[in-house]
Image (cartoon, helix red, strand yellow):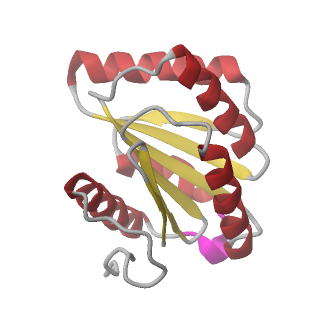
Amino acid sequence: MVHDVSHEHCAATLGGLLILIIKEDPRPSIFEQQRRWHRKLEEVSPQGVAFLAVLQADTPPPTEEARVVIKRVFREFGKLMKGGVMVIEGDGFVAATFRSVLSMMVLALRLPYPLKVQRSIGEGCLLVLPAIGKEARPSVHAVLVAAEWLKKEYRAGTLRVSPASSQPPPASG
């Protein structure tokens, strides 16, 4: 279910997993969105939820103001999340450096849940999906299909919030 589409990010849930595709620094309005995501996830999976955030390696580094917002977002996630993964897609020096810097930032935060930084959605799924209650845990395949669909539609500017029609295509297998 797609919950939010903005210039900065899009957010969708798949069972007990929150999927974020991030283009730009978050704005303070993300906190109200975050409260809505939390309520929805609690309904679906009271035994545990997690998040997967996807960024491209060419995403600009956050401003100092955005870093404050990002740290608060991660801490707010601690009220509900049992795990999280940040996926920095891309190969090469820039992507590896981005992952290293983000890993150091995560270590400094000392969050109450495990938050890992990975290079692919598949790798991220293996780490984060076990944190989700079994009744609402999507398969790795379902997450891969949903995330690719979200990225494609978001980049094309065709992604919309809609309880029925904005669903990713069903994953077979």
Q: Is residue 59 above or below residue 17?
A: above
Q: Is residue 55 left or right of residue 92?
A: right
Quadrant location, the C terminus: bottom left
- What is the x, y in percent for residue 65? 57, 19
Q: Is residue 52 above or below residue 2?
A: above
Residue shown at 67%/45% (left/top)?
A: 31
Where, by quadrant of the figure, is residue 90 drawn?
top left
82 and 148: which is toward the camera = 148
25 and 100: which is toward the camera = 25
Is residue 97 magenta-colored? no
Magenta span: 132-137
Residue shown at 60%/57% (left/top)?
A: 130
Q: Is residue 114 above or below residue 50?
A: above
Residue shown at 33%/78% (left/top)?
A: 171
- What is the x, y in percent for residue 133? 68, 67
Is residue 135 magenta-colored? yes
Q: Is residue 164 above or below residue 77?
A: below
Where, by quadrant of the figure, is residue 10 drawn?
bottom left
Residue shown at 57%/69% (left/top)?
A: 137
